Image: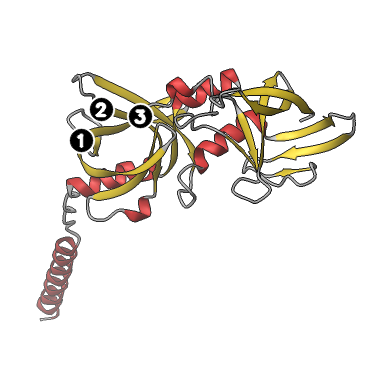
Amino acid sequence: MKYSLYAVLLATLLFSCKSKTTETNNDSVTVAAAPLDPTDSLIQKFKPIIQGVWVKSDYIKKVIVTYSPVAAADKAVGITIIRIDTTQIKGDKLVANAGYNNHEGGDVTIKFRPGQTPGTIQIDSSELGYSVENGDTVLVLTEINEAHDKVVTRFIKALNKADEKLGDGMDFLINKSLFSGSYILTDSIGRVRNVTFTDDGKVSGIKGLRTYYAMTDFIVGPMNNLDLLIFNLYAKDQTDYSFKITGETLKLYNTKPTADSAELVVDKLIYTLVRTK
């Protein structure tokens, strides 16, 4: 009788363990996640890439090489700056700000829908993609012009944040590339002082001058034909000088109009600034 009782207990225990094992295995079945919606997938892909303020690449490169926004004006055509704030995505769309010809602003609508070219999304009636060139991410805008030709424009990132004014990205790159740094200044009567220009357009060391801005809009005239540094922009004491950069030396000149007031010409040298760092 003992042997039979033990056999029954053992069989009961084995059956109980098998049942628990079966239940555990059933409970561990993984349900496959639903695939991402195509729009959500494109947002996840592009959102961290396109955020920020972007400047037309061939324009800013020519400014840097020539030390002259006037000399680069032929590249300031079409969209020259795009300001993209990805916190403003609504559904599958995002309204971004754009600057045209360094002269006027407007809006463009980015749509997180596939463009005709693989790896792109829609922007108005055009396409927006990106590539990595020399280690830097570049936005690539592809448009079709009135002659039905494909026009490709590349943009480099100026600022990560897009909470400033539209033109701040352009100003930042020009300031950083051409002017930002410390200088020894000599004025027209031989006085010497230390002067500093910052990336964000501040100047210190020149009495009465607080901010600076390099003119980049040469569409509206007359007397809009020289490279100008404008100090204290929009203030009552606003003043401007023509500038010329040669190596590490920045020279600021007074200007005067031609007899017919059609253009400005360079006049007396006012300041000579030699970069120290």
Residue highlighted by disc 3: 78
Residue highlighted by disc 1: 125
**In the rendered image of this protein, does residue 126 appear above or below residue 205?**
above
Say whether marks 1 and 2 touch (CB < 8 Å): yes
Spatial CA span between label 1 and label 2: 8 Å
Q: Is residue 163 left or right of residue 91?
A: right
The kind of residue tagged 1 is Ser
Say whether marks 3 and 1 touch (CB < 8 Å): no
Residue at image coords 76%, 35%: 182
Q: Position of residue 226 (x, y in %)?
A: 58, 25
Q: Residues within 10 Å of mark 2 (few under 14, many from 20)?
A: some
Residue at image coords 55%, 28%: 223
Q: Position of residue 93 (x, y in %)?
A: 24, 49
The kind of residue tagged 2 is Glu
> Of 166 and 277, which appears nearest the observer?
166
Q: Earlier in the sequence, mark 1 or mark 2?
A: 1
Q: Residues within 10 Å of mark 3 (few under 14, many from 20)?
A: some
**In the rendered image of this protein, does residue 211 appear above or below residue 255?**
below
Look at the image and tell me whether residue 134 can be seen.
no
Spatial CA span between label 2 and label 3: 10 Å
Q: Earlier in the sequence, mark 2 or mark 3?
A: 3
Spatial CA span between label 3 and label 1: 15 Å
Give the number of the disc on residue 143: 2
Say whether marks 2 and 3 touch (CB < 8 Å): yes
Q: Earlier in the sequence, mark 3 or mark 1?
A: 3
Q: Position of residue 212 (x, y in %)?
A: 65, 40
Q: Quadrant of the C terminus?
A: top right
Q: Is residue 93 left or right of residue 53?
A: left
Label 1 sits on a secondary structure element that is loop
